[in-house]
Amino acid sequence: MQAIKKLTTAGELLDQSVGWAARHLHQAVVNHGDKEIREYMDSWVKSPYVYKMNLFFDGNSIQMGSSPRFNMYGNEFGLGKGLAVLSGYANKFDGKVTLYEGREGGGSMYLEVCMLPENMDRFERDEEFMSLVDEKKAI
């Protein structure tokens, strides 16, 4: 597991669109390729450690989890295509976001957002964000 950071200020984030933020996150993932992964693994072999969330996360951040590199619906165990991908109970905290490709494919996605109730209330009142949410599928 590797953490990739993309830093900005709250002011810059507020001045820009949701698309601007998504492009920056996308670029961070795209730029994290074979070379960066091999460098990380080489350094880890020289000085191994166990990944601890508190080393990579502070309370004023949003942490994004998952990866578009994995085909989450490609596994077939004889019961048919999975209905949903869920991250389970581990590592749930205020500001944790997990993104998965949607079951429908074609650019659809499932977004799991973990927030304290007062923070979720503020998010739900953000008109730009809510204009992008398909409320029929929001759980």
Image: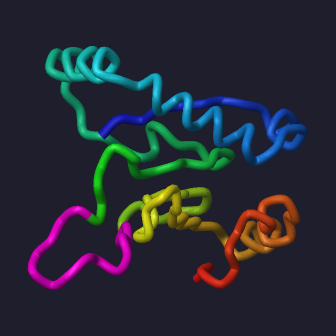
Q: Is residue 79 magenta?
A: yes
Residue 87 in the image: x percent, y percent? Answer: 37, 67
Rendered view: 43 above or below 22: above
Question: What's the image's color scheme?
Answer: rainbow
Q: Residue at x 64, y 45 (%)?
A: 61
Rendered view: 132 above or below 57: below
Residue 88 in the image: x percent, y percent? Answer: 35, 72
Rendered view: 35 above or below 23: above
Q: Residue at x 64, y 36 (%)?
A: 23
Q: Is residue 80 left or right of residue 53?
A: left
Q: Residue at x 20, y 81 (%)?
A: 80
Q: Is residue 58 left or right of residue 91?
A: right
Give the quarter of the figure containing the N terminus: top left
Q: Residue at x 37, y 76 (%)?
A: 84
Q: Quadrant of residue 89?
A: bottom left
Hey, which residue is sitting farthest front in the picture?
Answer: 106
Work out whether residue 41 or residue 29 is closer to the camera in this orientation and state it.
29
Q: Main secondary structure of the magenta part?
A: loop
Residue 72 in the image: x percent, y percent? Answer: 30, 61
Task: Give the magenta range.
Answer: 74-89
Work out whether residue 25 or residue 74 is closer to the camera in this orientation and state it.
74
Q: Is residue 34 left or right of residue 112?
A: left
Work out whether residue 97 or residue 111 is closer to the camera in this orientation and state it.
111
Q: Is residue 72 magenta?
A: no
Give the quarter of the figure containing the C terminus: bottom right
Rendered view: 122 above or below 69: below
Residue 15 in the image: x percent, y percent? Answer: 90, 38
Give the tally of numbered discs: 0
